[in-house]
Image: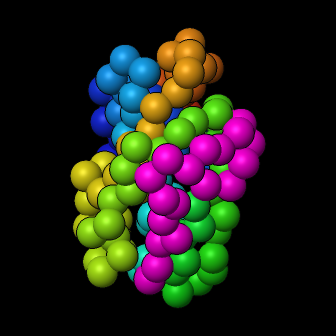
Amino acid sequence: MNIPANLKYDVEQHLWFDIDGDTVAIGITDFAQDQLGDILFVDLPESDDEFAEGEEFTEVESGKKATAIEIPFGMTIIEANEELDDEPEKINEDAYAAWIVKAKVEDPSVFDDLGDAAAYEAAIAE
């Protein structure tokens, strides 16, 4: 299982975060895409959409099920990865290159509560 050390993780939602100051690229982890199977559709939010902590910001549909994904902090969407509209399988091919959204947060300290690669690896091993 691929778990890049340079990213942060949300164990509950199986999200990865590539943080740069107060902006962040967000996607689902390799573990999550493996559990879901073939990704068929990603419901992308619009630029400037705002989401509160715990709110669903996307839904990922696979041959197995549709999974609503919640964000662990408030954010405003900067950009959605529109390549996923036509090629959602890119998540299966490389989960860490196929980000779902790029977003901005008001307070970067919200990233402090995210886990590192070791914590995520330990959590999925249980």
Q: Provide residue 50's location: percent of width, then percent of height.
A: 61, 44
Residue 12 shows up from this direction: no
Residue 70 shows up from this direction: yes
Please, is residue 47 above or below residue 5 in the view? below
Residue extending farthest to the front is 48
Please, is residue 99 above or below residue 40 in the view? above
Q: Is residue 51 magenta?
A: yes
Which quadrant would residue 80 be assigned to in this image? bottom left
Left or right of 122: which side holds 82? left
Which quadrant would residue 19 be assigned to in this image? top left
Residue for point 30% across, 80% down: 86
Residue for point 31% across, 49% down: 96
Q: Which segment is the magenta one?
A: 40-57
Please, is residue 70 above or below residue 111 in the view? below
Left or right of 112: which side holds 20? left
Which quadrant would residue 8 be assigned to in this image? top left
Number of numbered callouts drawn: 0
Give whichever of 47, 14 is nearer the camera: 47
Residue extending farthest to the bottom is 63
Q: Quadrant of the C terminus?
A: top right
Query: How is the rendered protein coloured?
Result: rainbow
Q: Provide residue 82's location: percent of width, then percent of height.
A: 32, 66
Q: Provide residue 59's location: percent of width, then percent of height.
A: 59, 67
Residue for point 48% across, 65% down: 44
Residue for point 37% across, 17% down: 21
Q: Is residue 52 magenta?
A: yes
